[in-house]
Image: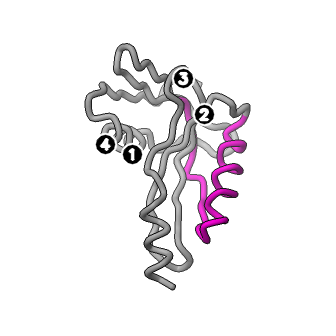
Amino acid sequence: AMAAAAEALSRVPDVEIDGDGVFKYVLLRVRAADGPGKDVVRGHGWAEYHADIYAQTAQELAQQGLGCECLGGGRLSHRPQERKIHVYGYSVGFGRADHSVTTEKLKAKYPDYEVTWADEGY
C-alpha cells in the first residue's frame, strides 16, 4: 500500500497554474497516508477565494487516496510574453505562503522564466 501511495504522490504535478494573468494561488502539502509529503503550487483565475482552489485540489487528491493541507496563499502575476512570474501577497484565510518555496517550484517548471517574489502587496 505504501508503494502505491508513493506512486500516487509522485504523479501529482508540483505546479499547476494558469497560463496568463494575475490570480490567487495556494501552497499545499500533499501527503500519502502516514507517508512522505511534498509541496505543490496551484494557481487559478477562476477562484474567487483561496479556499476555492484548496477545496477543488483536496477533492481531486482525495480520489487518489491523498490528503493535503494548505500552507498559505498569495497571488501570481504570470506574463508569458515576457517570460515572467511574480509571486506576492497573502491569503486572508490561510496566511502568507512561503513565497521562496513557491518561487523554487516555479523555476523548476519554467526554467527559462524570470521568477521573482515579494512579501508586499495583497
Q: Nearer the viewer, residue 70 or 121?
A: 70
Mark closer to the chain start, 1 or 3: 1
Residue that numbered label 1 is attached to: 101
Camera-side mark, 2 or 1: 2
Q: Residue at x 33, y 34 (%)?
A: 110
> Mark 3: which amino acid?
Gly
> Callout 4 environment at 10 Å: few (<14), some (14 to 19), or many (20+)?
few
Q: CA distance from mark 1 to mark 3?
A: 18 Å
User: Is 109 placed left or right of 56 in the picture?
Assistant: left
> Mark 1: which amino acid?
Val
Residue that numbered label 3 is attached to: 121
Q: Magenta stretch: give its range.
A: 49-75
SS label for mark 3: loop
Q: CA distance from mark 4 to mark 1?
A: 11 Å
Q: Is residue 103 magenta?
A: no
Q: Are marks 4 and 3 in contact (CB under 8 Å)?
A: no
Q: Residue at x 51, y 85 (%)?
A: 1
Per the rendering, the mark at residue 108 is: 4
Mark closer to the chain start, 2 or 4: 2
Residue that numbered label 2 is attached to: 44
> Mark 4: which amino acid?
Ala
Q: Residue at x 54, y 43 (%)?
A: 42
Q: Position of residue 59 (x, y in %)?
A: 69, 57
SS label for mark 2: strand
Q: Are marks 4 and 1 in contact (CB under 8 Å)?
A: no
Q: Are marks 2 and 1 in contact (CB under 8 Å)?
A: no
